[in-house]
Amino acid sequence: MPIKIPSELPARKILEKEGVPIIKDNEAARQDIRPLKIAILNLMPEKIKTETQLARVLGATPLQVELKLLALTTHKSKTTDEQHLLDFYHPWTEVKDQKFDGLIITGAPIEKLDFEDVNYWDELCQIFDWSRTNVEACFNLCWGAQAALHHFYDIPKYQLSEKAFGVFLHSVTDSTSPLMRGLNDSIPIPVSRHTENHPDDLARFPHLQILALSKDAGMALVHDPVLNHVHMFNHLEYDSTTLGDEYARDVDKGSTIDVPRNYFPDDDPSQPPINTWRANAHILFGNWLNMIYQSTPFDMSKIGEGRPQIAKTDETAA
């Protein structure tokens, strides 16, 4: 099934050229099915790129997906055209009475700050708490994953001595998880971060399942079946050129930055990178949508009913 996105959203033309199926409003209305309603809280500065990347992987499954883009009310983006935000983004406060099958919370280039020093931290915590009653499942990316673990479990992040930057092989630690179905035992994943979480901190909560791990880049993927959260600390959704664009941006700024590892052929930035992770991205996001499809109630008003309570200091977290 195709993905349903606004007809004028820039991502639409890009995805149509790539052959990603897009459904029109009148076509969706004729289908006697309920689409999965997925919201994206996009905290990234280059919002159009992130919208496109996520719409691409969400639109490549047999399930019909209806996308809604959300914005914070206490923070104004300085890097995205204001008209684009007005046309396509909904303030979270305007949709908080609605329910969603899924919520994706992206990363943000603020990971060196303490969580409580982020100027929209209080609102983000409200959204995390709102998701417990109004969202069937969450997929938290990069800093968004670190923020969720900190909010719900007081799990800290740690500064790296140098940026983890490149494409790193990760071992799948539990191939029986529905999230990992169809993935190889070892998968390449783009990494771009200055901080990390430590497995020892997660060990206090036995239900937190580490699903992918790299000896060079640490944890990549954690599943929380109690909260129905997926935490991805890295970036399977990235385009082929995203790491290269980040590298060129930092070089232009005069920043000290190493060439991203295992990315350019022969570590030569003049050569185009080869995308080795695209299939993994489609499989992982497809598995996540399939898990939602199997668990979410047809009557969306019932989403969030009977959710267990968690305790940040309770090792059973049940």
Image (cartoon, grey):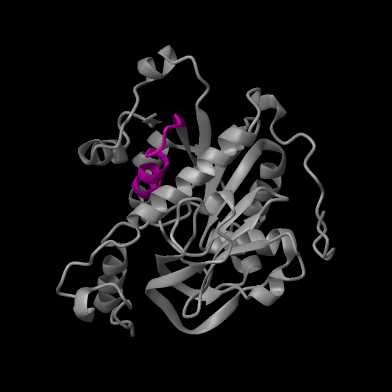
Q: Can residue 74 be seen in this view?
A: no
Q: Is 77 situated left or right of 241 in this image?
A: right
Say how many tags the image has.
0
Image position of 165 with respect to 11: above or below: below
Q: Which residue is drawn at 51% across and 50% down?
A: 181
Image position of 240 with respect to 260: above or below: above
Determine which quarter of the picture holds residue 209: bottom right
Question: Residue 69: image x %, image y %?
Answer: 47, 39
Q: Which of 150 and 178 is in front in this view?
A: 178
Q: Which of 197 and 60 is in front in this view?
A: 60
Q: Residue at x 31, y 56 (%)?
A: 239
Image position of 301 with respect to 276: above or below: above
Quadrant where the N terminus sits is top left
Seen from this angle, which residue lies furthest left?
A: 270
Q: Is residue 179 visible?
A: yes
Question: Residue 221: image x %, image y %?
Answer: 55, 62
Q: Which of 290 and 157 is in front in this view?
A: 290
Question: Residue 124: image x %, image y %?
Answer: 62, 53
- Image: magenta residue range: 51-65
User: Is residue 63 highlighted in magenta?
Assistant: yes
Q: Is 147 situated left or right of 265 in this image?
A: right
Q: Residue at x 69, y 51 (%)?
A: 225
Question: Residue 314: image x %, image y %?
Answer: 85, 63
Determine which quarter of the picture holds residue 206: bottom right
User: Is residue 182 highlighted in magenta?
Assistant: no
